[in-house]
Image (cartoon, rainbow, N blue to C red):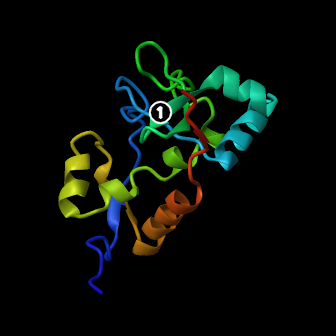
């Protein structure tokens, strides 16, 4: 098997620019662990957390996935001069930018650098660290429910 392009590691350090948290519409999908952790962090019952801070997003025509809501200007609901839930942030946020979609090949990684000024700079993350993030992506799957017509 060929070694991944990141076998020697990849450089990345968060620049705290918040570009990944603001201005563009997107989804922050939540696993059961993520939702439980955020509800606990906010000292809310689970169902209240879901009602206030989450939305169900149609996916593949058959299911809906649980995602955090956004503000009207497309900021993450928890972004206010920085992440207000940083210590309980979802796996999707904790593992960025070491996502499968950004690690398919070196071209995808370099293209991601156009929207993240921390890619290619700062701390060298080992292949082991990167693959640990990929394992989290595999195991912390988003909460899903069947769509109701």
Q: Which of 44 and 86 is in front in this view?
A: 44
Q: Position of residue 53 (x, y in %)?
A: 63, 24
Q: Is residue 139 left or right of residue 9?
A: right
In the image, farthest residue toward the front: 149
Q: In which quarter of the image is the N terminus?
A: bottom left
In the image, farthest residue toward the bottom: 1
Residue 31, above or below 10: above
Could one spot residue 65 in this view of the protein? yes
Residue 40, above or below 130: above
Q: Nearer the viewer, residue 73 or 58?
A: 58
Q: Which of 120 and 57 is in front in this view?
A: 57
Residue 83, above or below 52: below
- Residue visible at 49% across and 61% down in the picture: 133
Image quadrant assignment for residue 43: top right
- Residue visible at 69% across and 37% down in the picture: 38
Q: Where is residue 78 in the image (x, y as percent from the top left)?
A: 57, 26
Q: Position of residue 71 (x, y in %)?
A: 49, 17
Circle 1 residue: 58
In the image, farthest residue toward the top: 72
Image quadrant assignment for residue 101: bottom left
- Residue visible at 32% across and 76% down in the picture: 7
Q: What element carries label 1?
A: strand
Label 1: few (<14), some or many (≥20) within 10 Å?
A: some
How many numbered circles does the render carry? 1
Q: Position of residue 98 (x, y in %)?
A: 40, 57
Could one spot residue 122 in this view of the protein? no
Q: Is residue 40 left or right of residue 82?
A: right
């Amino acid at each position: 098997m060929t070694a991944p392009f990141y076998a020697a590691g990849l450089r990345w350090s968060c620049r705290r620019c918040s570009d990944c948290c603001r201005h563009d519409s997107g989804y922050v999908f939540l696993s059961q662990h993520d939702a439980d952790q955020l509800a606990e962090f906010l000292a809310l019952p689970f169902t209240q957390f879901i009602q206030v801070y989450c939305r169900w997003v149609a996916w593949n025509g058959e299911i809906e996935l649980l995602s955090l809501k956004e503000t009207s200007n497309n900021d993450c609901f928890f972004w206010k001069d920085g992440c207000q839930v940083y210590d309980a942030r979802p796996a999707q946020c904790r593992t960025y930018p070491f996502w499968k979609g950004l690690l398919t090949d070196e071209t995808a990684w370099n293209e991601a650098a156009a929207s993240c000024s921390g890619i290619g700079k700062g701390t060298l993350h080992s292949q082991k660290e990167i693959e640990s993030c990929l394992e989290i992506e595999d195991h912390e799957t988003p909460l899903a429910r069947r769509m109701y017509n």
